[in-house]
Amino acid sequence: MTNSSVRIVSLIPSGTEILATLGLTGAIVGRSHECDYPPEIQDRPICTQARLNSNALSGEIHGEVNNLLQSALSIYQIKTDVLEQLQPTHIITQDQCDVCAVSFQEVEKAVASLIHSSPQVISLQPNVLQDVWADLERVGNAFGVDSVKVIENLEARVKICQKKIQGLSLNELPAVACIEWTDPLMAAANWIPELVNLAGGQSLFSVVGQSSPQLEWETLIITNPDVIIFMPCGFDLNRTRQEAKLLTQRPDWQKLHAAQSGRVYITDGNAYFNRPGPRLADSLEILAEILHPEIFDYGYKGTAWEPL
């Protein structure tokens, strides 16, 4: 199949970014409602819609998500009529998290209903950093694109971070709590603890490669992290600030070491930390800049992260 006859629909933002990094932006004919990067893909037809209101309060979103999943409904719907018109040869989706994007079952169901095309489904399943690089390679192989240089470049950026923190002693590695959701309180997991450790921190509350655990407020207070970083799933910097401020109003907040020492930060989790694609290298650099400003200055401050 020549590249000109390839017609890709990407149903997940990280998949879209992987395609773009591999030089395949021109082959993308459709996208999910959440695919917004790189900017030039925003004119492609949208093939999904959410069944919930993402502007609601965190607790309400969480409740809606649970209700939908308990009714065995996907949180997102595929617009099969748009898919039918686009006649894709390939669909990129994921089988990692039913809250992050269209469920794999929904995609299979939609593909089975298509009359004019039977696209090949490429499903990404990243849990750790190495999986993301493997996904890049797999997508490259599927379209006959060499991914070696792209992956080498991303790995080199990781090595630079590792090298720069090598000389730090254990007591120079702050204990870090990354917050993925505020109501209920959840710690960020999967690749996040790995990124924290690579950036010269000691990750608290979650296990590399595992899904995000709920976190008791009392546990946060008792553990008393050196650094708290907010990166709620799907929220940009402004929305994250609103979410974080709700927590900072709680009575025990001021007892926290991180609050007293001004080491509480907000990030654009939607653009960076929540997307298992090439910008996880940026996410690592953002963490390095937050945790060790004396060593790192990549220039992300003000756009990707800010002190709260």
Image (cartoon, rainbow, N blue to C red):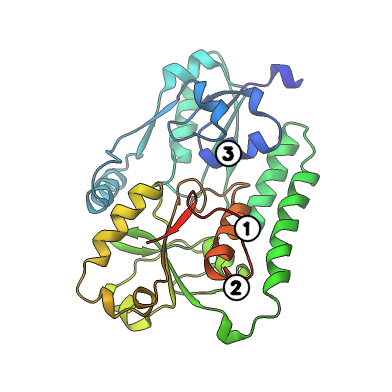
Residue under the image location 67 percent in, 74 percent down: 165
Disc 2 secondary structure class: loop
Residue type, mark 2 in image: Gly
Q: Are marks 2 and 1 in contact (CB under 8 Å)?
A: no
- Taking depth in this image into account, of 152 and 131 the one nearest to the observer is 152
Q: Quadrant location of the N terminus?
A: top right
Vertical comparison of 128 with 3: above or below: below
Give the percent coordinates (x, y) of residue 292: 57, 70
- Whether residue 128 is visible to the viewer of this picture, yes or no, is no
Label 1 secondary element: helix
Q: Which residue is mark 3?
A: 15
Identify which residue, 218 or 305, lies in the foreground. 305
265 sits left or right of 52 in the view = right
- Disc 3 is placed on an element classified as helix
Query: Residues under labels 2 and 1: Cα distance?
Result: 16 Å
Is the residue marked by circle 1 packed among few (<14), some (14-19), or many (20+) residues within 10 Å? many
Position in image of residue 166 (x %, y %): 70, 77
The disc, 2 or 3, on the residue closer to the chain's N-terminal end is: 3
The residue where tag 1 is placed is 129
